[in-house]
Image: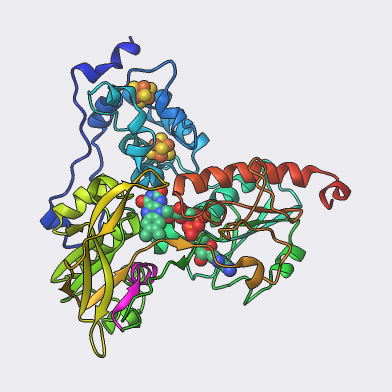
Amino acid sequence: MATQRMLQFVTKSKEMPTKRAADDRREDFDEIYREYAAEKAAEQASRCSQCGVPYCQTHCPLHNNIPDWLKLTAEGRLQEAYEMSQATNTFPEICGRICPQDRLCEGNCVIEQAGHGTVTIGAVEKYITDSAWEQGWVLPVTPMQERPESVGIIGAGPGGLAAADHLRRAGVQVTVYDRYDRAGGLLTYGIPGFKLEKPVVMRRIEQLEQSGVQFVLNCTVGEDISFDAIRGKHDAVLIATGVYKSRDLEAPGSDLPGIVKAIDYLTTSNRQGFGDDVPEYDSGALNAEGKRVVVIGGGDTAMDCVRTAVRQGAVSVKLLYRRDRENMPGSQREVQNAEEEGVDFVWLTAPAGFTGDTAVDGVLVQKMRLGVPDASGRRAPELIEGADYVEPAELVIKALGFEPEALPTLWNTPELAVTRWGTIRCDHTTHMSSLPGVFAVGDIVRGASLVVWAIRDGRDAAEAMLDYLAQPASLAAE
Ligand code: FAD
Ligand code: SF4
Ligand code: SF4
């Protein structure tokens, strides 16, 4: 009987939750998708064909038990679905919102491959845990017994928080240090509310506090406290500091006022959304209102900038990218959302310089064409001589990617081994760095990556740290 509820993809077509109209969503920073009604979530979950070898699960970095929680949802057994979903994912409702599902679970769903339209795995995952919060099923951690060992975590992004949750479940004493005034890392200050509303992040942090995790905020390791002091305070340390050094653009006029970094722009916008006092927003320095805006870059950060500028009331928003639509790294779903909201994508263009006397008033744009594939396999952009023009702009946002900060230098710890890209070198199974008892996870190990990978790393590193803490002290010090 139960299996008859499944395999409904033949008669039921794929339906995402309702997307708000573009004119409506341009007016605020609320999420653009509404929640499924219970019947619709069950119906969409019932489209799953319960594959014996579920490729969706294989391609989920957390190896979520997707077919099983889809089946439980289709059967209306939502609390069991939630229990199963949270067993492998620390923040299912966050991944359900912001994972690039088209590249991960949903992109590999056999129903999608067979041309029926994927099972809407992300939307169902979000629905299950949002419902669990509403029902009061998501509870703070209460460890069976407290342990004396303590772990210091540097960085309160998803990598650090996933590890904190896992370690608290085992009763370990956990302190998380972060240089910002709020925890959450890029979930809080990078990703805009229209993809991930902030109360969704804040309720998780409150619950970690209720679970006994200590947060030390406004504390920059290397300035307010030394890395050595943190090592001295704790039995093991986890570095989860992310990557924050913005790649820059060397071009004539690139230091003119009005040319800003994406991370500064997005952080300011998110702070404004929290109701903070933000002078850079009020002064207009990091505010697109009434301006012609040009964003440079083709990744997801660029996409978040253009859509933020639309919501701030920009007169026009253009994105310059040196390749074409098919060859851009950003998600196609996000491109479509941005286009609906009025963003103009100017493909095959690159900035050659900036015009203006006391502040930027234009971007000197070069036109490109695609040549033969380069080492990455993508067709390399080539300049079209003599086709330059000036694009007027009062705000230019550089979204060219991120690199790691030089932690060994900043923390006066030359023995912390890094790769030639500056990411921390660590054992890929245990996540232990070159320093005994010091582990590392997330973007500071992988380079700019995804939330779901940071969660996976945090979970795996916490397991390895528990093994490390269980060793006799003499072995652990080796
Ligand atoms: P972070 O989230 O960066 O957290 C690191 C924390 O460490 C920060 O809070 C920082 O303040 C703190 N810190 C750093 N140095 C110090 C120090 N010296 N002392 C104390 N604290 C310190 N991924 C997705 O999966 N989906 C998306 O839609 C998506 N959108 C994105 C949009 C933007 C604009 C950006 C920039 C990234 C996006 N990502 C997205 C990527 C994702 O946010 C990251 O991969 C993820 O947050 C990495 O987690 P983390 O824990 O390693 O680091
Ligand atoms: Fe898909 Fe991400 Fe959820 Fe995994 S965590 S099932 S990849 S949405
Ligand atoms: Fe269901 Fe698709 Fe996963 Fe198969 S691949 S188990 S159909 S969600």
Q: Position of residue 474 (x, y in %)?
A: 88, 49
Please report the residue visible at 32 percent of the width from the left and 38 percent of the height from the top.
102
90 or 355, which lies in front?
A: 355
Please report the residue visible at 20 percent of the width from the left and 77 percent of the height from the top.
362
Colour pattern = rainbow
| 93 magenta-colored | no
Does the image show residue 474?
yes
Q: Is residue 297 above or below residue 69?
A: below
Locate the N terminus by quadrant: top left
181 or 380, which lies in front?
A: 380
The stretch of residues the image draws in magenta is 257-268
Q: Give the tally of numbered discs.
A: 0
**Which residue ends up furthest to the right in the rendered image?**
474
Residue 316 figure quarter: bottom left
Q: Is residue 163 above or below residue 215?
A: above
Please report the residue visible at 51 percent of the width from the left and 48 percent of the height from the top.
454
321 or 208, which lies in front?
A: 321
